[in-house]
Image (cartoon, rainbow, N blue to C red):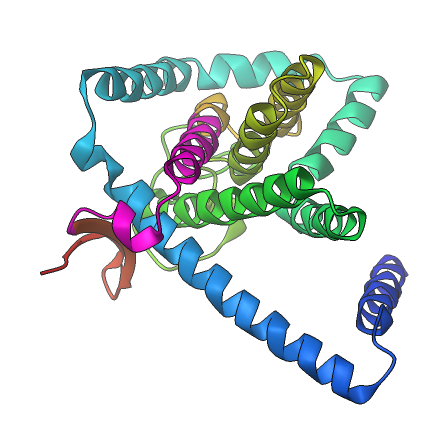
């Protein structure tokens, strides 16, 4: 029943979008051609940005390495307390906590976030608001790139989720298995939430309540994953760092106003899948 309801809702939205402003076949055909061209261009930009973001460590300075070391250090500290933090959350369950956790788990779900950003972009397009359009597109790109990085890391580590009962030190990666019980590290919900929150906090930094609200919501998403016993604290900590880093680098690239090819300095690190598992490879352009 639930699936049927959502399927019908998706159908209505798609039908509405197809019919909106399209009164004849020729108009719809032209719109479809423009849409496909826009999608191809967006995919190319996203791919170039992904390589630029992953290659960025090759150009890091002292401050960047300090931030990376800090993120890794916090993750390791959390890892030492994973079991203790889990026990605290599991022994402090409540009806109100269940309700809040259910809400914020959806907020950090890519399946909800991506369509929401798409509709927000359409709203900006209809209203002629360029800031909304750009913020929505950059947020969506940040969501996609952080999701890809997180996916590769999940396959690389194959960490067992807390609710499997295998303990916090259970890793059997790398591998191709998408067994959900072994995809704990890092948290994709946390990465998604912080990848979008960071973009929104930057685009609307002049409105002080926006950064506060965005980061508070992202933090609640991360905590909900621990509360629901779906992730260890180190999972959500590192996931948040991935989302934040992705968004910040993407914003830097946007601020520079250069094309994807110009952002690459010959070398790039790209995610790869081989018969031996998932990992990263170095690509060099001559």
Q: Residue at 40% x, 30% y: name it.
A: 245
Residue 156 rendering spot, x and y as whole percentages: 32, 47
Residue stretch in magenta? 238-266
Q: Nearer the viewer, residue 122 or 87?
A: 122
Between 14 and 104, which is closer to the camera in this rendering?
14
Where does the image place residue 272, in percent across and percent down from the top left? 28, 59
Which of the pair 144/151 is nearer the observer?
A: 144
- Residue 273 left/right relative to 202: left
Q: Is residue 171 visible?
A: yes
Residue plotted at (70% across, 84% down)? 29
Relative height, residue 266 to residue 80 (above, below): below
Q: Position of residue 230 (x, y in %)?
A: 58, 34
Image quarter of residue 158 = top left
Q: How many marks?
A: 0
149 lies left or right of 233 = left
Q: Residue furthest bottom?
A: 25
Q: Residue at x 19, y 22 (%)?
A: 61
- Residue 262 sits above or below residue 198 on the image: below
Name the quarter where the C terminus is drawn: bottom left
Q: Position of residue 194 (x, y in %)?
A: 54, 29
Location of the N terminus by quadrant is bottom right
């Amino acid at each position: 029943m639930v699936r049927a309801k959502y399927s019908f809702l998706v159908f209505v939205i798609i039908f509405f979008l197809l019919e909106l402003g399209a009164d004849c076949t020729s108009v719809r055909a032209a719109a479809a051609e423009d849409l496909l061209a826009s999608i191809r261009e967006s995919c190319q930009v996203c791919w170039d940005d992904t390589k630029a973001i992953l290659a960025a460590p090759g150009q890091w300075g002292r401050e960047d390495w300090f931030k990376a070391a800090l993120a890794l250090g916090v993750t390791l500290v959390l890892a030492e307390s994973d079991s203790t933090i889990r026990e605290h959350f599991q022994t402090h369950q409540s009806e109100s906590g269940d309700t809040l956790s259910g809400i914020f788990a959806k907020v950090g779900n890519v399946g909800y976030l991506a369509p929401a950003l798409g509709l927000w972009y359409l709203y900006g397009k209809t209203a002629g608001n360029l800031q909304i359009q750009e913020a929505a597109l950059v947020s969506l790109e940040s969501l996609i790139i952080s999701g890809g990085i997180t996916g590769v890391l999940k396959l690389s580590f194959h960490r067992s989720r807390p609710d499997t009962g295998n303990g916090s030190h259970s890793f059997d990666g790398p591998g191709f298995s998408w067994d959900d019980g072994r995809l704990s590290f890092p948290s994709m919900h946390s990465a998604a939430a912080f990848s979008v929150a960071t973009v929104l906090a930057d685009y609307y930094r002049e409105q002080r309540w926006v950064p506060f609200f965005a980061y508070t919501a992202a933090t609640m998403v991360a905590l909900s994953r621990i509360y629901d016993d779906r992730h260890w604290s180190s999972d959500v900590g590192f996931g948040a760092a991935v989302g934040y880093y992705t968004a910040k680098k993407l914003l830097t690239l946007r601020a520079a106003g250069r094309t994807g090819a110009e952002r690459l300095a010959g070398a790039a690190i790209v995610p790869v899948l081989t018969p031996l598992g998932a990992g990263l490879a170095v690509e060099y352009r001559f």
